[in-house]
Amino acid sequence: GAGVSQTPSNKVTEKGKYVELRCDPISGHTALYWYRQSLGQGPEFLIYFQGTGAADDSGLPNDRFFAVRPEGSVSTLKIQRTERGDSAVYLCASSPRTGGRDTQYFGPGTRLTVL
Amino acid sequence: DAKTTQPPSMDCAEGRAANLPCNHSTISGNEYVYWYRQIHSQGPQYIIHGLKNNETNEMASLIITEDRKSSTLILPHATLRDTAVYYCIVRGRQSDSWGKFQFGAGTQVVVTP
């Protein structure tokens, strides 16, 4: 079946602009996660949703970052007033639910470059 | 969640078994050990996970020591396509949910012909 998809695959923007990154989880998966990966490092947790609500947003670096999942399926990560330090690969993952034995399935990521 | 320690890199000959170690000495009783790998420019790919028993699937085997303070991921017959960064993650319950994975730097595995 279809895996997690993310659009766009690449996004180039200028410092100070607003960007939206989209994640389509695997159908039926109730949990959705966003991570950020800088060059040479492992993915860093940002936020996760259980259904429509953000169950843990402790990884969002500051209030320029915001994410929504209004219908419990597709999620959008929004970054305001982008800075060069926001350049990274943004990864989305989904799982059937949250639990110790539940596996997260990752999408290919969106590479964001802030000039 | 408990922290993990992995060697930064290792080489493996094609066709041979690759044994990837991971230390997680502060693991607690309800924490699972997960392994993911990330091939260049792709998202992380799930390999295997376990709690205390050894596990095997079509990709790999996971050996967890009896005290659960370390584990080894075994790729039985490494191929060139197994070249990737391998992450060992310990995942536990925080408050009322399991939630996130905390990735470290992983082990860069290079399989050579």
Image: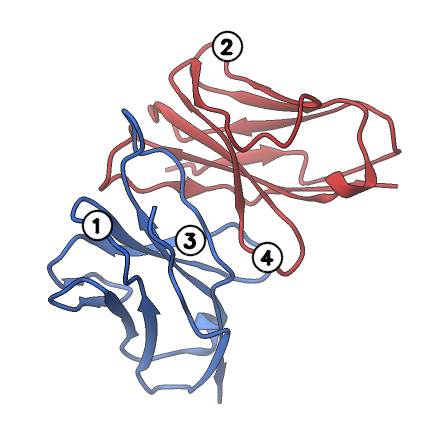
Check chain identity for marks 4 and 3: say if they share one.
no
With B40 as the anchor, is B35 left or right in this view?
Answer: left
Residue type beneath disc 3: Gln
Q: Nearer the viewer, residue A100 or B4?
A: B4
- Left or right? Give the position of B20 relative to B31: right
Using the image, name the chain to which the residue with label 3 belongs.
Answer: B
Residue that numbered label 4 is attached to: A41
The letter of the red chain is A
Mark 4: give few (<14), some (14-19) or many (20+) Cα within 10 Å: few
| Labels 4, 3: front one | 4
Q: Which residue is mark 2?
A: A70
Q: Dot 1: what SS?
A: loop
- From the image, tell me which residue sits under label 1: B28
Q: Colour of chain B?
A: blue
How many numbered circles are shown? 4
Question: B100 left or right of A6?
Answer: left
Task: Please state the horizontal and vertical placement of residue B43, each as a whole percent of the image.
Answer: 52, 50
Q: Position of residue A113 (x, y in %)?
A: 79, 42
Identify the chain of the residue marked 4, using the numbered disc in the image: A
Residues at marks 3 and 1, common chain?
A: yes
Amino acid carrying label 4: it is Gln
| Quadrant position of the N terminus of chain A in the picture | top left
User: For the residue marked with disc 1, what is the amino acid?
Assistant: Ser
Q: Nearer the viewer, mark 4 or mark 2?
A: 4
| First in sequence: mark 4 vs mark 2 | 4
